[in-house]
Amino acid sequence: MTSSGRNDAIGHLFHPKNVVLVGASDRPGHWSQRVHDNLKRFCFAGKVFPVNPNRNEIWGAPCYPKLDALPEAPDHIAIFTPAETTLTILADGGAAGARSATVYAAGFGEGGDPEGRKRGARLREAIERTGIAVIGPTCMGVACGAANFSTVPDESLQPLMPGPVAIAVQSGAMATVINRAVNDLGLQPAFLASCGSQIGCKISDFIDYFATVPELRVILCYIEGVPDTERFLEAARRARANGKAIVAVKVGASESSRAAALAHTGSLAGSAEAFDAVAGSAGVIRFSSFEEAIEAVEFLARLPLPRGRNIAVMSNSGALRSLITEAAERTGATLATLSDATQASLGAILEQATVSNPLDTIRTISTKQYTACIDTLVDAPEVDIVLVAEDLPVDRSVDRRLGNLLSMEELSRRAEARGKTVAAFTPLLTSPSEYGRSVREQIPRVPMLRGTERALRIVAALTSAAARPLHTGPFVTPPADTELVRQWRDRAASLSGPTALNEVESKSLLRAYGIPVPPERLVNTADEAATAAQEIGFPVVLKAVSAALPHKSDAGLVCLNLNDADAVRQAAAAMAERASSLPTTLDGMLVAKQVSGGTEVVLGLQRDVEMGPVVMFGMGGVLVELFKDVSFAPATLDKTVAREMVRATRAGAMLDGFRGRKPGDIDALCDALVNLGRLARDFGDVIESVDVNPLLVREQGVTALDALVVLRPPDAKS
């Protein structure tokens, strides 16, 4: 189905002409009773038809025995019956003309049981055959403010209204919790979709539909699994291109969370790092908690993404000024360095000898001074974002605070026109009074973030997302060597599972993709090793070669600093003796030129179960496991993205010449990262992982000193 066709289907799901409640019951607390009451409470304009073969009347209206007995064709079917009956009801609905449906039941393979999986496969076939837009199973339905429509069985569900926020979550209970949280911001969501296990409509379908809705500014998602990665990325890019921000809470930061996702909705969840690398390149902004995601919605529903990183913060508390400074360091927020001209202007307004950022006004100031300070910061070329510590007034007695906020509303609009951002934050996590909520409605263009450190963390995350280069579409290039790729794919096809290559084979692939390796030679005897060393030139390194020994140094099978033929011959003989006691046979010994004089880094490539291949960079040698100072990017990276990867790590600072060190060849390093991504794209699903550790970065050039490539059978499960 085309994107346009899917969007039409989602449109029918959100805007039905009538609703049929199959398995209807007026038993108190029954989900059909709750949905019926919500449709009545929200003033849904269409007809609502109960279907139950055991009843003639429910809710004072006729109850029908089956779908083909209805007085008009069904449009949306809400199915409250067990999983075993769902397929028959969908088939009957399709025959009767239904265009959309909500399937609440579990039992379609969420927990991995074989019978449930078979039922899930049959449900997919039924959806494909009937063309019905189905949300679920294992879901809490959908709601649309413009249509006054809801199949969400929660009697406390707050009404939705046309506005800037849409919610699509792979959860049931959290759907209504998130809806309440967004309402507490004074923002009534326009759409709510609880996708469940996504056998029917997926998160990507809703993102793609929301991308076309003009009034939406932010799409909030909770995601356990992405079963359609390319479609998801395509929808995310379209949403971002249409001016919509996508805020996501994504499961996958730990093995236990991935296991819980599989049990909950049957979703295979990939790693959070891979999601950040790939989905982030399509414009998705991930947060680790709902609390932070809701704060991001508060910001993005009112203002676009910031256009720069430099933040000026204003408060009237010296204590808060100190807390802000420390919080900025912890959260990675960039505090602007105020120019002499800006400091002079602020000093004149405040009648202070010295001012700095964060700006402490020291005392309560007039609204005129307050406005002038913010205006000065907005005008400052060195400032991109102005954050102001401010609380909503508790009652009408605090006229000054009301005046400040109303002036900030006007300043925010003017700042946005100049490409700047003005936002407020409450120093602590306070809840507004009823009067405060009424004031909130008067300042719709001023985000009110809650908590000092949280506010800085949110703004830092949004500035990073805004600055990130976006990948604009499928990246298709011809293979660097078609015959080479074919040969390795043929070899992978013969494998029964992931299989490591030895160092020589691994390095041959790197060499083919323009990643330099040392002069080296594979040998079998001590005499051959000595001859090879003389031809290569001393000093040399001697290593055992076996795919079964990925960590050779741990087994004592690496000899360094061999400076003459006798030393090589003796080391080779000792290595052969040591290897004879191992449970594996060596493929030979590798004599390699010993290369030194640079910074060791690590390059990696890992195939993620959801996001596909992801490139990794970080500190090399044994330090990679100690510090875990790494960054990630999609395999479609270019040199601009590669430079961002390097800059994001401590290794990048070392390569820049940290504390008098000689700078490394970052340009050659970025070439190696890009080439590694090219290898991943060319080989596709037969590369499980690549580990280049260490890669030596010198003043001129880079060299892969060791490498491990793991192949996998085509289309094998990760």
Image (tube, rainbow, N blue to C red):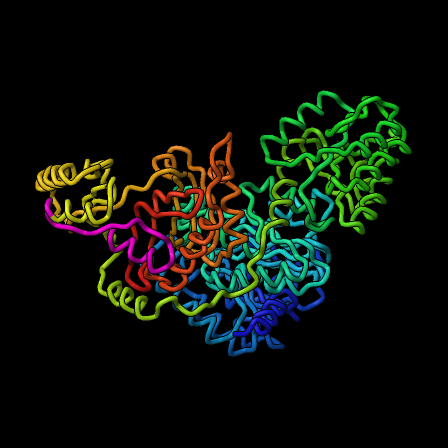
- Give the answer, above or below, for where 499 lies relative to 564: below
Report the side of 588 relative to 106 (left or right). Answer: left
Q: Which residue is nearer to you in this view: 357 or 591? A: 591
Residue 573 lies, with reference to residue 215, above or below; the image says above
Figure quadrant of residue 238: bottom right
Q: Looking at the picture, does residue 117 appear above or below residue 580?
A: below
Residue 441 in sight from this viewpoint: yes
Q: Position of residue 342 (x, y in %)?
A: 81, 34
Question: What quarter of the picture does the C terminus occupy?
Answer: bottom left
Residue pictured at 50% horizontal, 31% vertical: 660
Report x, y in % for residue 97. Answer: 56, 77
Magenta range is: 503-527
- Residue at the location (67% across, 28% down)? 324
| Between 218 and 304, the one nearer to me in the picture | 304
Q: Is residue 399 visible?
A: no
Q: Report whether 34 appears left or right of 697.
A: right
